[in-house]
Image (spheres, rainbow, N blue to C red):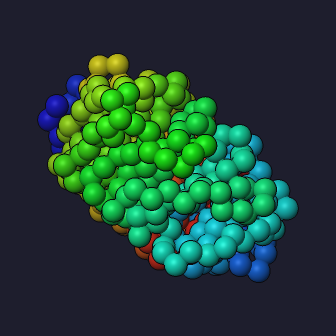
Amino acid sequence: MQEMKTDGVINNNGEFLTSGISTNQSITTYLEVLNLNGHQDLKVNTWDQQAGKSQLICNNTLTHNSPAITFSSDGQFLATGRLSIKLWNLSLGQLVRTFSPISSIMQAITISSDNKMIATGRVAGTIEFWELATGKLIHQFIGHVNGVNSLTFSTDGRLLISGDRGKNIQIWDTNTGKLVRNPNGELPLMRHRDWVNTVIVSPSGQTIASCSHDKTIKMWNIKNKIEVACLSGHSSSVNDIAICPHGKLLASGSSDGTIKLWNLSTKEVIWTLYEHISEVYSVAISPDSKILVSGSADQTIKLWNLNTGVLINTLTGHTSGIKHLTFSPSGDILASGDENGNLKIWQFK
């Protein structure tokens, strides 16, 4: 596929598709911002997709956090943090609990699918396992020498997968807090050639996907821990990945400034996006598999039609690169976290 240095999207046949608006639907968009003192409703703004115009300005943010942010599977809670975890009730707009602080900055956070546990990964290389209802520390996993960049639970919640700055992917038993070993007693060798930036589990629960500074995306069999595929095509670090809920497509964002959509059956690129003017740090896919969002060092969030690759809109308001994006389970809320530790909650109605 021959890539073009211009704005827009290139499909797998090398055809350039211009940016545009995919529907004539009108959406009312407002920013609902949580701050350290509670809750504040900000600006209401109407976004007319047909006209393609939107100006979203945020006057306040949730500050002094890491970019790490996660929703509970029922959409009731939002967990954020830096040294300590803060658990927010979204429907009430209130801080529910602050967990005991630990003297290392949090890089990763995730909530188990049964909403009972929170796992956190830190720059110091430790992983903590907390009880959501009480804030009690259950386990501290020791095994990473380098900082933990990413965490994800298996679909059944029995395993926790971690990726670190030492090139390693490790799998933990959530009941014991110990590393999962092969039948011969050895630790599985799951490695990239550079930092592991993101680890995720496919919706089927059978595959782990990882991306790295080494410019690749790898797929691993979760049972035997063997690499089953390696996707190459980015010319710089692959910073984030997301898999569609139906499990057939994977999106990747890279320091080369592009976003790629991959067919996981053929392992081929479907299209490549070029609208960002700097590194792409984060990507996320809506629960209905209709919208792809991307966050960049250019301080913008872009919304794309996942089926066509056409740009829908650009959200502004962050003053540093957007390091993390995540949708609520219902898909009507998007959370974004930037390099300065500012978090924004965008609600679409």
Image coords of residue 173 (percent x, y): 53, 41
Residue 277 locus on image (x, y percent) = 30, 61
Query: Viewed as shown, does residue 46 lie left or right of 149?
Result: right
Give 65 or 17, whichever is nearer the viewer: 65
Q: Can residue 53 be seen at all in this image of the molecule?
A: no
Which image quadrant is residue 195 in? Answer: bottom left
User: Which residue is drawn at the image coordinates 33% and 40% (left, top)?
Assistant: 187
Rendered view: 276 above or below 83: above
Horizontal side of 172 relative to 80 (left or right) equals left
What residue is shown at x 42% (from left), y 26% (from top)?
Answer: 223
Residue 133 percent across, percent down from the top left: 78, 56
Residue 265 in view, yes or no: yes
Image quarter in which the N terminus is found: top left
Numbered label tally: 0
Question: Foreground residue, 252 or 43?
Answer: 252
Q: Is residue 3 left or right of residue 289?
A: left
Q: Residue furthest right?
A: 92
Question: Outermost residue toward the top?
Answer: 265
Residue closer to the observer: 46 or 142: 142
* Residue at left offset 38%, top offset 51%: 163
> Where residue 320 sits: x, y (%)?
43, 73
Q: Residue at x 85, y 62 (%)?
A: 92
Report the residue that reaches farthest toward the front.
Answer: 185
Q: Splitting the image into 4 quarters, where does residue 130 fall? A: bottom right
